[in-house]
Amino acid sequence: MVSRAEPSLSGRWWWSIDRVILTTLVVLMVSGVVLLMAGGPPVAERLGLSTFHFVNRQVVYLLVALAIFLSTSLLAPRQVRRIALIVFVLSLAGVVGTLYFGVEVKGAKRWLTLGPLGSVQPSEFLKPAFVVLAAWAFAEGHRRPDLPGTILAFLLLPITIVPLVLQPDFGQTILVTLVWAGLFFVAGLHWFWVLGLGGIGAVGLFIAYELVPHVRARIERFMDKGSGDTFQVDTALESFAQGGWFGKGPGEGTVKRILPDAHTDFIFAVTAEEFGIVVCMVLVLLFALIVLRALFVAQRAEDPFVRLGVTGLALLFGIQAAINMMVNLHMMPAKGMTLPFISYGGSSLISLALGTGFLLALTRKRPRAESFGKPERRS
């Protein structure tokens, strides 16, 4: 055990870090590798790859993610803002780049090929950076009314979501907008604006339904199974029925063998078939623990930026998990969104490591002067 008197960076980190959030995140990361051993092999075999192709790649991605996760958690709030700004600019450029140079998959251009490094999805990295910058802008608008912080927060949203809509990636657009709306509410702005934004969102969804065939098809398939192909959702629901409370046991699942995205979007359903609804409920509790603990810490924070940043990052993490699980249970239209730290995917895993690293950095116990980014005054 590291002593409280230990002056080293690791010592200060250990005694300042929120160990509830840290432990729960590590449990999720390890669980992701274990659960991918159930969902990954059937997909790999169908594609003619080695049985543990996706598992092995995920372990490599996880090692990179852990390095980013731990190094990011060491940052001070000012450094978090600076790195978020750099990541935002680069990832926004990447999202715009996908519109011209992206690889088209299922009718959308969301991926850039980077030679030997493989493919990357820039929108994944855009999310945590956007949340930090929006929190910063709202906080500055609250702290310094003479600065256009709130106006910048308003401008950030269209700058971010317009390229996402053009890809098109409506799942990420909805996620980013919901988190931004949460920050808007927590920042203390008037209910009139909250309701107005809700109305604008509803109008935007209606326009997307009317003008975008892809969105219309997904909503209609959700409302009426007979209106289109619902194979993945039906198969996912069958996984829950087959698994029951305690599952069939590791490696004993059969429904997963015909589920196309068993290792990514629908790994929650594979978990239900092999490990049971009880394990799924444990996963839900782990996600809820992280979000609730972060919101508890945010509530006690004195610095507006820390309060808003922690709240936004917690909402980003929790809403993404909720969307994935709700899609698996046919509680909302399919969105193509990963389950944090559980689904396979390099861009998703590294982006989540960055976002949760930011979260740990902002929830660390530190002197008030460090949180506000300026030295204390001496009497």
Image (cartoon, helix red, strand yellow):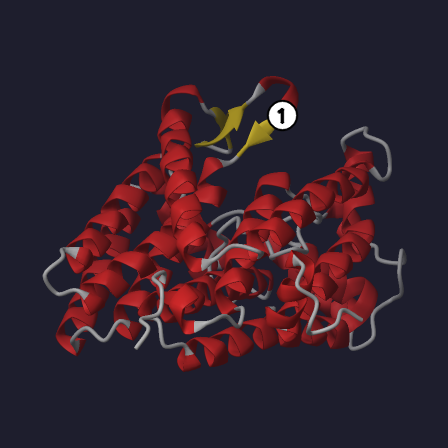
**Total label count?**
1
Within the image, what quadrant is residue 302 found in?
A: bottom left
Q: Residue at x 36, y 60 (%)?
A: 373
Q: Which residue is mark 1?
A: 118
Q: Nearer the viewer, residue 234 or 146?
A: 146
Q: Residue 81 vs residue 286: left or right? A: left
For this orientation, the residue located farthest to the front is: 379
Instruction: Judge whether residue 365 can be spotted in this image.
Output: yes
Q: Quadrant of the C terminus?
A: bottom left
Disc 1 residue type (three-letter): Gly
Is the residue 81 above or below the residue 116 in the image? below
Q: Position of residue 127 (x, y in %)?
A: 43, 49
Q: Residue 36 vs residue 339: left or right? A: right
Is the residue 236 above or below the residue 182 in the image? above
Within the image, what quadrant is residue 165 found in?
A: top left
Q: Residue at x 49, y 44 (%)?
A: 124
For this orientation, the residue located farthest to the left is: 146
Q: Residue at x 45, y 24 (%)?
A: 102
Q: Quadrant of the N terminus?
A: bottom right
Q: Position of residue 101 (x, y in %)?
A: 43, 20
Q: Residue 300 vs residue 225: left or right? A: left
Disc 1 crowd rating (10 Å Cα; few below 14, some 14-19, many 20+) is: few
Q: Nearer the viewer, residue 288 or 53?
A: 288
Instruction: Judge whether residue 239 can be spotted in this image.
Output: no
Q: Residue 373 vs residue 367: left or right? A: left
Q: Nearer the viewer, residue 273 or 224?
A: 273
Q: Nearer the viewer, residue 227 or 28?
A: 28
Q: Position of residue 95 (x, y in %)?
A: 40, 33
Q: Secondary structure at mark 1?
A: loop
Q: Position of residue 49 (x, y in %)?
A: 81, 30
